[in-house]
Image: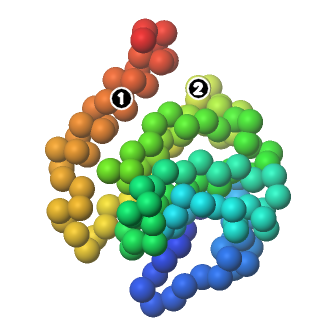
């Protein structure tokens, strides 16, 4: 798995550079995408699947917003979204055990908290999100809804 920060104040990566980094990996997390539209990336990554946070139009192009997970064609059938949150800037995925090899499925989370703004994501919002996530997840795995 690869984590890649899409927007750096000192250097912007070109789409072709990002795609060349993504291609050899099964699962790649991109943060600060600043968009929900991954079409430019997917044009150069045939067969890849994208799971992302749907951003409000007001947050498009803003620094510190957007997370996308790109999944290689060989793994696309084995990864599904459990939960996303634009407010907390995180996405949780369930990866079938066939990808990583353990006896059980694996839950993978990707989050971005902007270091420039302590007020952007209040602690109570993060706690609520994770509490809801784990209650939902435990119910799903135990068969309780």
Residue pictured at 23% horizontal, 41% vertical: 127
Task: Please say if the residues under marks 1 and 2 sit with CB atoms less than 8 Å apart.
Answer: no
Residue 53 is left or right of residue 17, and the answer is left
Q: Quadrant location of the C terminus?
A: top left
Crowd around label 1: few <14 · some 14–19 · many ≥20 (10 Å): few
- Please tell me whether residue 45 is drawn above or below residue 106 in the rendered image: below
Name the mark on residue 134. 1
The quarter of the picture where residue 130 lies is top left
Name the mark on residue 45. none
Q: From the image, tell me which residue sits under label 2.
A: 104
Q: Is residue 38 visible?
A: yes
- 3D distance between C-alphas at marks 1 and 2: 17 Å
Residue pictured at 69% horizontal, 39% vertical: 99
- Rendered location of residue 47, percent (x, y): 81, 52
- Rendered location of residue 76, percent (x, y): 73, 42
Crowd around label 2: few <14 · some 14–19 · many ≥20 (10 Å): few
Residue at the limit of the structure toward the front, as seen here:
57
Residue 31 is left or right of residue 19, and the answer is left
Sequence-wise, which precedes: disc 1 or disc 2? 2
Residue pictured at 70% horizontal, 66% vertical: 41
Quick one: SS at disc 2?
loop
The quarter of the picture where residue 3 lies is bottom right
- Rendered location of residue 89, percent (x, y): 38, 54
Quick one: SS at disc 1?
helix
- Please tell me whether residue 114 is drawn above or below residue 138 in the rendered image: below
User: Residue 140 versus residue 36: which sits nearer the camera?
Assistant: 36
Residue pictured at 54% horizontal, 85% vertical: 12
Tally the numbered discs: 2
Q: Quadrant location of the N terminus?
A: bottom right
């Amino acid at each position: 798995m690869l984590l890649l920060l899409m927007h750096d104040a000192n250097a912007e990566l070109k789409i072709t550079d990002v795609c060349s980094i993504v291609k050899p990996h099964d699962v790649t997390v991109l943060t600060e995408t600043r968009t929900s539209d991954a079409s430019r990336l997917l044009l150069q990554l045939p067969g890849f699947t994208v799971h992302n946070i749907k951003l409000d139009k007001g947050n498009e192009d803003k620094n510190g917003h957007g997370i996308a997970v790109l999944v290689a064609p060989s793994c696309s059938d084995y990864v599904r979204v459990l939960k996303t949150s634009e407010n907390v800037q995180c996405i949780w995925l369930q990866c079938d055990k066939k990808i990583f090899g353990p006896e059980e499925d694996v839950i993978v989370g990707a989050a971005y908290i902007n270091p420039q703004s302590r007020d952007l994501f209040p602690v109570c919002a993060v706690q609520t999100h994770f509490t809801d996530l784990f209650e939902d997840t435990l119910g799903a795995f135990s068969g309780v809804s």
